[in-house]
Amino acid sequence: MPHVTVVIPTYNRADLVQRSVQSVLNQTYRDFEIVVVDDGSTDATREAVTQFCDARLRYVRHEANRGVAAARNTGIEAARGECVAFNDSDDEWMPHKLERQMGVLSTVDERVGVVYSDMWRVHGSDGRRRKYYRAQHIMPADGVVHERALGFGIGCYVQTAVIRRECFEKAGMFDEGIAPLEDTEFIMRVSRHYHFYHIAEPLVTQFMLAGSLSQDTEALARSTRRLIDKYRHELPRKTVALYHANMAEQLIVSSWRKLAGGRPAASGRDFSKACWCGLVALRTDCAEAGRLLARRLFAAFQEARERLRHAVGVDSAGGH
């Protein structure tokens, strides 16, 4: 049996899924299998995946689209490995990812359930805007860090992680009612029982593409609301404020996008919800919410300035 099962959920990514699969096949660590779960695609995803002639790859299909959490759960149920890793169908692993992480797991005790890493984030279709995403440095000596996980305090994305199979048996599978943020919610549950180990180097490249679920600000706000409802009795007051401040930011972005798309009524509804969430955040913990909103506004200003500089650079290059 393989030591690691790599689960790749995909939906209508025929043009990208081969890059994801190939980056796993290119691993220097070889004791793995790949389970590609096609979540009811209507494009040529099946043909794109089955072009690979590798006995380690299995293709599983949902007849109807059920969402990324359900696709991951199907992959876990089909897994034969002692550990499970995930790659998104539009992301890419570094060749030594599994070697680094399995090397750690072979030296730590079984209380360490998750080994995760930093990653590169690539913005835009041209791939020229590349940022380093640094996760929180959680190590076994920190013990169980459930309180930090409740407040987004780990920053562990599942495509950067290798997870012991027993974590799913102890903490449960992905919550199919929360997407996106289903990986954040899963990490919250795992953090009740297991230690984490952070590798402070980027082992994954995440492509931030328009149309991906992680870019759907309205869905992010909905999932944040569900997280608050699910963990209401565990969340500290400060964390509740941070969650509402996050919702306010997501809804503001959604509002601007709808306004730009010629949907003023929908934009107005999102703006009203954003104002309400911002007020709840400030009323719950004015100082903490205020600091977060100020940081986010500053970050948004910096990103807008960078995009403008990039656009001017492109125009200038085109003029020569």
Image (tube, rainbow, N blue to C red):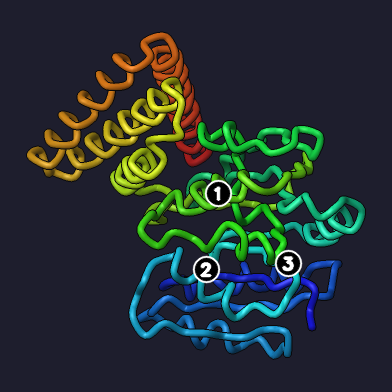
Does residue 169 appear to the left or right of 33 in the view shown? left
Q: In the displayed structure, would residue 56 be above or below residue 98?
A: below
Looking at the rendered image, the disc whose residue lies closer to the viewer, 3 or 1, is 1
Q: Residue 305 location in percent, x, y?
A: 45, 23
Mark 3, Cα crowd under 10 Å, few <14 / some 14-19 / many 20+, is many
Image quadrant assignment for residue 65: bottom left
The image's mark for residue 189 is 1
Mark-to-mark CA distance, 3 and 1: 17 Å
**Does 164 appear above or below 9?**
above
**Residue identifier under label 3:** 83
Q: Quadrant of the N terminus?
A: bottom right
Q: CA distance from mark 1 to mark 2?
A: 16 Å
Q: Secondary structure at mark 3?
A: strand
Could you say which is closer to the camera, residue 166 or residue 261?
A: 166
Residue 82 against residue 225 in the figure, above or below = below
Residue sitting nearer the eye, 311 or 304: 304
Q: Which residue is mark 2?
A: 72
